[in-house]
Amino acid sequence: MLSKAFPFLSIVVLLFPMGIFMLASPPLLILKHDTPLDGRFIRGLFNLYYVALMTIGVTAAVGCAVFGQRVVALAMGGLVIFVFGIRRWVISKMDTLRGAMAGGDSSAVPRFRRLHIAGMIVNMVQFGTVAWGLTRLAT
């Protein structure tokens, strides 16, 4: 019974930080993104989100593999690899743009804002994909 419940519970637990992030990010768009504190806070939020997803995803992948749910384990592993790559790209880009903002580059602020929006869109796609996977698992 646990072998059937673990993948389902893993996906539900994975959806929790995705949903929280999806609800927490849009209100941050009211920030002007032009101060170092704004950029640092948004970067920290994104980093925390990515680390949480990777941690939950690795735990879920290992657990699913142990319980013989190979398809779900592979899907979770794929998600972890995707999030790892996105994290490296987004966080390094945010760090570069924060440095440019501190250096007085006026075009860095709108680029940081667009990166913030792109990160939110990627999260929504991830959320939808994981939720869709949950419906496939339930059938």
Image (cartoon, rainbow, N blue to C red):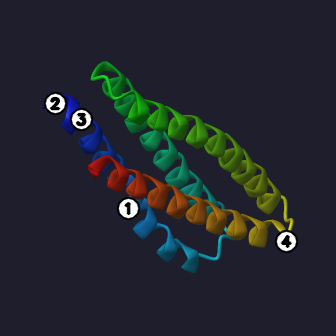
Q: Secondary structure at mark 4?
A: loop
SS assignment at label 3 = helix
Question: Mark 2 highlights which residue?
Answer: 2
Quote the CA–CA distance across marks 2 and 3. Answer: 6 Å
- Foreground disc of the pair 2, 4: 2
| Gap in angstroms between the C-alphas marked 3 and 4 | 49 Å
Residue type marked 3: Phe
Residue type highlighted by circle 2: Leu
Q: Which residue is mark 1?
A: 19
Report the Cα–Cα distance between label 2 and label 4: 55 Å
Q: Place residue 24 in its image quadrant.
A: bottom left
- The amino acid on which the numbered mark 4 sits, given as a three-letter code, is Ser
Residue 127 % position (x, y): 45, 58
| Residue in view at x 51 percent, y 64 percent | 124
State whether residue 8 is above or below residue 118: above
Q: Position of residue 99 (x, y in %)?
A: 78, 53
